[in-house]
Amino acid sequence: TIARSVQETMRLPPLPTIRDILKLYRLQALRQLSQNFLLDQRLTDKIVKAAGNISNSEVCEVGPGPGGITRSILNKGPSKLIVIEKDKRFAPALDLLVESSHQRMQVILGDVMNFDMSKMFSEDKRRDWEDRPPHIHIIGNLPFSVSTPLIIRWLQAMSERQNAWSYGRTRLTLTFQKEVGERMVADIMSEQRCRLSVMCQNWCTVKHKFIIPGKAFVPKPEVDVSVVHFTPRIQPQIPLPFKLIEKVVRNIFGFRQKYSIRGAEKLFPVPVRQKLGTEMYHLAEIDPTTRPFQLTVEEFGRLCHAYCKICDQDPRLHKYNHRAAREEREDFDSLYEEEQALLET
Ligand code: SAM
């Protein structure tokens, strides 16, 4: 009850609606920045609820815009809220919230893509990775062109326990285009199973919370929106470096409908492709005719370990990239061709 009364006194005073704010500060959504605003407080409250209990937590909101979700966050009584917004036009609207927030809110005008959060929260919030997640939450409704590359970048930061993950297993609640959100949680055999499913599920427990119809946004985007919640895993399912896993998973999903070994072979130079592809599947004890979308994360793990083993025997292979510039590929191919020829004589 004490916590509740603190939360009650923390509630925001009456404020103009977000619609009024947009008019007052003449904030037109910029199409080139893919800005779509949420004006309905029931929906912004629902997004914040999807993050879990944030009272007395520290929260970072990315891309607050005119501040709809921001208000819903403040009403839930976090001890601190830091918002990161790229578009300076929103500064006056956000400052209005700072003034009403009992010193709890801070605005950073900047680009979240390159932002380092490793010193942004309070020191006493730090937790060991193996401990329960810290009382720190990241929440945001960003443009899709930002949120999808950003989650990949953040998965890597998680894998290295950098950025916000230097504080422990910081949780995320983010929006994506509906189809992308569905891919993130897609299980084996599903139509949507892809590279993103394996990458997200390897490092996180991913929950698809709900869908917001596109028509709830102003201006309305062409697509519906998924709200997705991520909790970093104590142990990733595949305990190997991010770049290595990404390379193997990307290659294997290179040919979605074919046997998965076809993509895996592309990890190796042309002259040794078949031989090493077969060896990789043999070492991993995986049937080469399995299709990419039929492979579990655990099976991808066995394939990654097999790939590592093969590369350890010939470290030059680590550098091979079939999508590299043609010259670089051809150098590799001719080198291996000569070696194969020598072996055969
Ligand atoms: N969160 C608000 C809402 O739900 O109404 C605004 C949503 S709008 C789709 C995305 C917001 O993210 C815009 O305010 C935009 O300026 C901001 N934004 C876009 N790219 C960003 C970046 N790289 N870093 C920080 N903010 C960004």
Image (tube, rainbow, N blue to C red):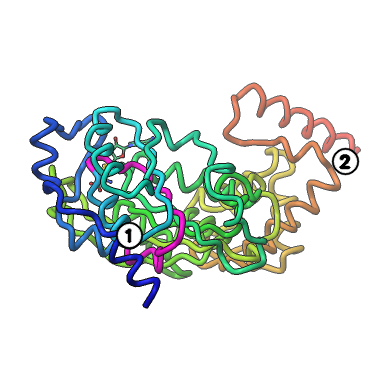
Q: Nearer the viewer, residue 42 or 265?
A: 42
- Tell me, for residue 130, which label it has, or none: none
**Image quarter where ligand 1 lies:** top left
The secondary element bearing badge 2 is classed as helix
The secondary element bearing badge 1 is classed as strand
Callout 2 amino acid: Glu
Q: How many discs appear?
A: 2
**Can residue 264 be seen in the rendering of this structure?**
no
Q: Residue at x 12, y 48 (%)?
A: 17
Q: Residues within 10 Å of mark 1 (few under 14, many from 20)?
A: many
Figure quadrant of residue 208: bottom left
Q: Give the distance between the C-alpha atoms of the residues marked 1 and 2, in whole angstroms.
A: 57 Å
In the rendered structure, does residue 50 fall within the stretch colored magenta?
Answer: yes
Q: Residue at x 28, y 66 (%)?
A: 8
In x, y percent, where is residue 54?
41, 63
| Residue on which disc 1 sits | 227
Q: Nearer the viewer, residue 196 or 128?
A: 128
Quadrant that contains the C terminus: top right
Lateral position of residue 175 relative to residue 327, left or right: left
Toward the bottom, the furthest residue is 1
Toward the top, the furthest residue is 327
Tell me where the magenta segment starts and ends, as one range. Answer: 48-66
Q: Are marks 1 and 2 in contact (CB under 8 Å)?
A: no
In the rendered structure, does residue 169 fall within the stretch colored magenta?
Answer: no
| Residue on which disc 2 sits | 344
Q: Is residue 54 above or below residue 333?
A: below
In x, y percent, where is residue 266?
62, 44
In x, y percent, where is residue 177?
30, 51
In x, y percent, where is residue 284?
72, 64
N-terminal of the two: label 1 or label 2? 1
Q: Is residue 282 above or below residue 254?
A: below
Lateral position of residue 127 relative to residue 39, left or right: right
